Image (cartoon, rainbow, N blue to C red):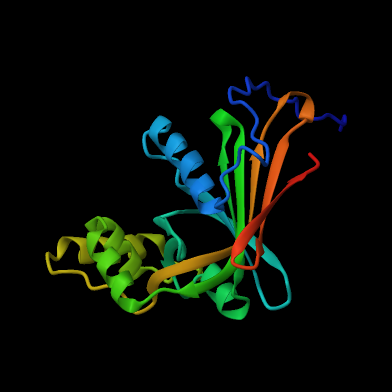
Amino acid sequence: MTESYIPRASYDFPDQPMDCGQAHPDPLEQFRIWFEKESIEADGDGNRMALATADRSGSPSLRMVLLKQYTSNGFLFFTDYRSRKGIELDQNPRAALLFYWERRQRQVRVEGRVERISRKVSVDYFSRRPRGSQAGAATSHQSAPLADRPRFEKQVAAIEEAGDPISCPEHWGGYRLVADRYEFWQGQPGRSHRRILYQPEGSDWHRSELQP
């Protein structure tokens, strides 16, 4: 087989680069500025994020999930506690998030410890989900082997069509990532990208620029 390489994509790099002096002193506020701009221009579809976890041995895994809320308390997402990510978070309660917004050639990396949120908040959010999503969560043992797809789909349909309220399963709920490291990346021509790192410094955050 002839060796070949993937051709490099071409980008317009529409935004002015950000430096340490222009970045907001609070990384959560800087995230909000970028996130809201992306979400408005992407019709609210800017909340997709990659979630990286690792088991107790350090073996990593990665998947896309949806950010449901971000506040000073952390970045919120929901899943099956019995899923691979749920098991790994029980073993190693640290994780990393990656937001990538291709149109503006921006990335935000967020790292920190992860904790389960209260049962009350999980139940409240579950009650707002579409009924089909509720039925799927109530039926699925996420990440477990699926031996009979048609049977699984019938079970989901039966719960969805029954008409009774669907209660939030005990195995399902939310996690909050409490950030202790942020990196904001702005693509630039010629690989001269801008990278702004935030790390805790006492009760504040220290900003520094990294080489591209």
Residue drawn at x 38%, y 71% is: 173
Residue 194 lies in quadrant: top right
Q: Residue at x 61, y 37 (%)?
A: 22
The quarter of the picture where the N terminus appears is top right
Q: Nearer the viewer, residue 76 or 63?
A: 76
The answer to which quarter of the image holds residue 77 is bottom left
Q: Is residue 24 above or below residue 112?
A: above
Counting from the top left corner in percent of width and height, residue 210 is at: 77, 45
Residue placed most toward the observer, 113 or 11:
113
Outermost residue on the left side: it is: 163
Tell me if 9 is positioned left or right of 119 in this view. Answer: right
Numbered-mark total: 0
Percent position of residue 209, x then y: 74, 44
Observer able to see residue 84:
no
Position of residue 16 relative to residue 162, above or below, is above
- For this rendering, which residue is in front, 113 or 169? 113
Relative to 106, say whether 152 is above or below. below
Residue visible at 78% across and 24% down in the picture? 190
Q: Is residue 100 above or below residue 202?
A: above
Question: Given the current orientation, which residue lies at the most extreme right position?
Answer: 2
Using residue 100 as the reference point, say whether residue 123 is left or right of it. left
Can residue 208 be seen in the rendering of this structure?
A: yes
Looking at the rendered image, the quarter that the C terminus falls into is top right
- Identified at 23% across, 59% down, the residue is 128
Q: In which quarter of the image is residue 42?
A: top left
The front one of 183 and 170 is 183
Q: 167 left or right of 83?
A: left
Q: Position of residue 135 (x, y in %)?
A: 27, 64
In this rendering, position of residue 199 left or right of residue 155? right
Find residue 126 and report its horizontal and vertical position in percent. 28, 65
